[in-house]
Image (tube, rainbow, N blue to C red):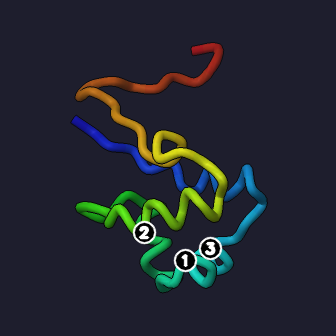
């Protein structure tokens, strides 16, 4: 089982930098970077709520479940 973090995609869609998100939700830029890279074991619901509020999105826009072995293929492959 794999949980994929698409925070970088949402930041790009909202044309927002990690630094700006970090300032708005009250966490360090390093922690935002760790979230973006998926190198965290969990995220607090209050932090997720602040991210969703700031980016005007749903948790499912940021977190995605992919079953083991589920590979996303590029168009044309």
Q: Residue 45, how many percent across, how many down? A: 35, 62
User: Is 40 located above or below residue 70 in the figure?
Assistant: below
What distance separates the C-alpha of mark 3 from that of mark 2? 11 Å
Furthest residue in direction right, as rendered: 15
Q: Are marks 1 and 2 in contact (CB under 8 Å)?
A: yes
What distance separates the C-alpha of mark 1 from that of mark 2? 7 Å
Pick the front one: 73 or 41: 41
Furthest residue in direction top, as rendered: 76
Q: Earlier in the sequence, mark 1 or mark 2?
A: 1
User: Is 5 located above or below residue 76 in the figure?
Assistant: below
Q: Dot 3 corresponds to which residue? A: 21
The residue that appears at 33% across and 24% down in the rendered structure is 70
Quadrant the N terminus occupies = top left
User: Is 61 located above or below residue 30 in the figure?
Assistant: above
The residue that appears at 68% across and 78% down in the rendered structure is 20
Mark 2: which secondary structure?
A: helix
Quadrant assignment, res 7: bottom right
Q: Dot 1 corresponds to which residue? A: 25
With 24 as the anchor, is 30 left or right in this view? left
Q: Are marks 1 and 3 in contact (CB under 8 Å)?
A: yes
Mark 3: which secondary structure?
A: helix
The residue mark sitting in front, 3 or 2, is 2
Q: Dot 2 corresponds to which residue? A: 47
Q: Are marks 3 and 2 in contact (CB under 8 Å)?
A: no
């Amino acid at each position: 089982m794999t949980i994929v973090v698409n925070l970088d995609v949402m930041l790009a869609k909202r044309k927002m930098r990690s630094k700006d998100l970090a300032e708005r939700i009250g966490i360090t830029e390093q922690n935002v970077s760790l979230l973006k890279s998926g190198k965290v074991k969990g995220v607090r619901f209050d932090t997720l709520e602040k991210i969703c509020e700031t980016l005007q999105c749903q948790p499912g826009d940021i977190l995605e479940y992919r079953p083991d072995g589920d590979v996303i293929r590029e168009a044309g492959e």
